[in-house]
Amino acid sequence: MQNLAGIALGVLLLAVGAAYLVDQTSRPGARTAASLGDGNAIVQTVGGRELTIPQNWFRFGEQMQTGFVSQVDLSVHLASGVVDVTLVPRSRARASSELLDSVYVHQFAKGTLSGVPGLIGQTLGGSGYAGEVLWYDALAAQPFVAKCIAPVEVDAASRCVRTAQLTSGLAAIYSFDATMLTDWRDFDAQMGQWLQKIGAN
């Protein structure tokens, strides 16, 4: 009887310890910044694609488990700032460049905005687009396109979203501060290094 009680206590302590570890790793700032040299990876499969992801890259600690998942949420560090990345099957997200001609162009308000060298800014009008600005490269066949929304908090930066279709059959949804738009020409190449390391590109 005492052996059973001891085993039960041991299992309980292990469960509490595991829950504490997940809670701590889920908290912002609990882990060191992600880098391309990180190891200690786990394997996840999303959209039929097997990815080998360093644990330090996960945005949420509770997602650090091997197996099949519907999406992967990561947080990586470029030279100009932090990018949150969500990887999903390609069928679940349309590329921002596709939406430019099929959706966004019909929502353009009059006039253009300046402020990001090489990109044109357009305020979006219409229902559901209040406070949103689209930044795009008008010269490229497959243009860089990012939609940004004004911050709710005072002194906070606008947040931008860009979706790209990857050759792996996945789509990458990037979320980042608008201050990073100045490096838009190198954005996809820099992100490609991170995605290639885990097998997503």
Image (cartoon, grey):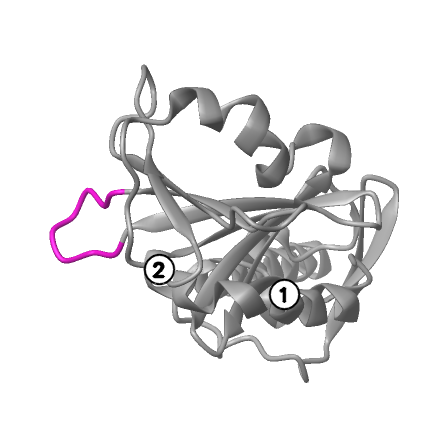
Residue under numbered circle 2: 116
The label nearer to you, 2 versus 1, is 2
Q: Which mark is residue 78?
A: none
**How many numbered discs sit on the rendered protein?**
2
Residue at 30% of width from left, 26% of height from top?
109
| 178 in magenta | no
49 horizontally vs 65: left or right: right
Residue kind at label 2, given as amino acid type: Val
Q: CA distance from mark 2 to mark 1?
A: 20 Å
Front-lying residue, 44 or 106: 106
Indicate which disc, 2 or 1, sits on the residue closer to the N terminus. Answer: 2
Q: Secondary structure at mark 2?
A: loop
On-image quarter of the C terminus: bottom right
Across and down, in percent, residue 130 comes to 26, 27
What span is colored magenta in the figure?
150-157
Residue at 25% of width from left, 33% of height from top?
131
Front-lying residue, 144 or 78: 144
Residue under numbered circle 1: 191
